[in-house]
Image (cartoon, helix red, strand yellow):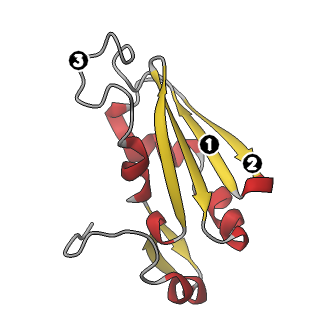
Amino acid sequence: MTTVQLVQLAHARSGDKGDNANVGVIAYDPEHYELLREHLTPEVVKAHFGEMVKGDVERFELPNLGALNFLLHGALGGGGTMSLMNDAQGKVFSTGLLRIEIDVPDEVATATAGQGRIPEGWSP
């Protein structure tokens, strides 16, 4: 097993739903969907964001799309029109989630090396 950042396996989009952030994670390769489903539990996502998410994290599975959707309750300080947060619409939650590290089989790490957009010189 090897540890890789999620960005090697998936891309993501995020936005706001009132006071909740919505994060969709889509596997580049449908064969890696099960790895995402196994490792990206609501508990793991909540722990990753820590105090940024005040409420629960819900996960919705979309196997036909090779995707997971997360609803982060209480993550936007009241929502777009009420919040004084820099990111009141939750656009950077997707980038934040793509930085999470997960364990994958060595052959998956090798096959996905360099995939995704990891800024040069960035390290966890």
Which comes sooner in the sequence, label 2 or label 3?
Answer: 2
- Count numbered badges in the picture: 3
Q: Residues within 10 Å of mark 1 (few under 14, many from 20)?
A: some
Tell me where residue 50 sits by quadrant: top left
Inspect the image, locate mark 3, and give the three-letter code of the amino acid beneath it: Leu
According to the picture, the residue beneath numbered tag 1 turns out to be 69
Percent x, y for residue 118?
33, 70
Contact? badges 1 and 2 (CB < 8 Å): yes
Residue drawn at (71%, 64%), measured in percent from left and top? 34
Percent x, y for residue 73?
50, 24
According to the picture, the residue beneath numbered tag 3 turns out to be 84
Residue drawn at (46%, 84%), measured in percent from left and top? 113
Q: Residues within 10 Å of mark 2 (few under 14, many from 20)?
A: some
Q: Is residue 54 left or right of residue 73?
A: left
Q: Is residue 3 left or right of residue 124?
A: right
Q: Secondary structure at mark 3?
A: loop
Inspect the image, locate mark 1, and give the three-letter code of the amino acid beneath it: Asn
Q: Is residue 1 visible?
A: no
Q: Is residue 95 left or right of residue 122?
A: right
Q: Secondary structure at mark 1?
A: strand
According to the picture, the residue beneath numbered tag 2 turns out to be 62
Position of 66 relative to 119 (above/below): above
Depth check, front residue: 112 or 51: 112
Q: Secondary structure at mark 2?
A: strand
Q: Is residue 60 visible?
A: yes
Contact? badges 2 and 3 (CB < 8 Å): no
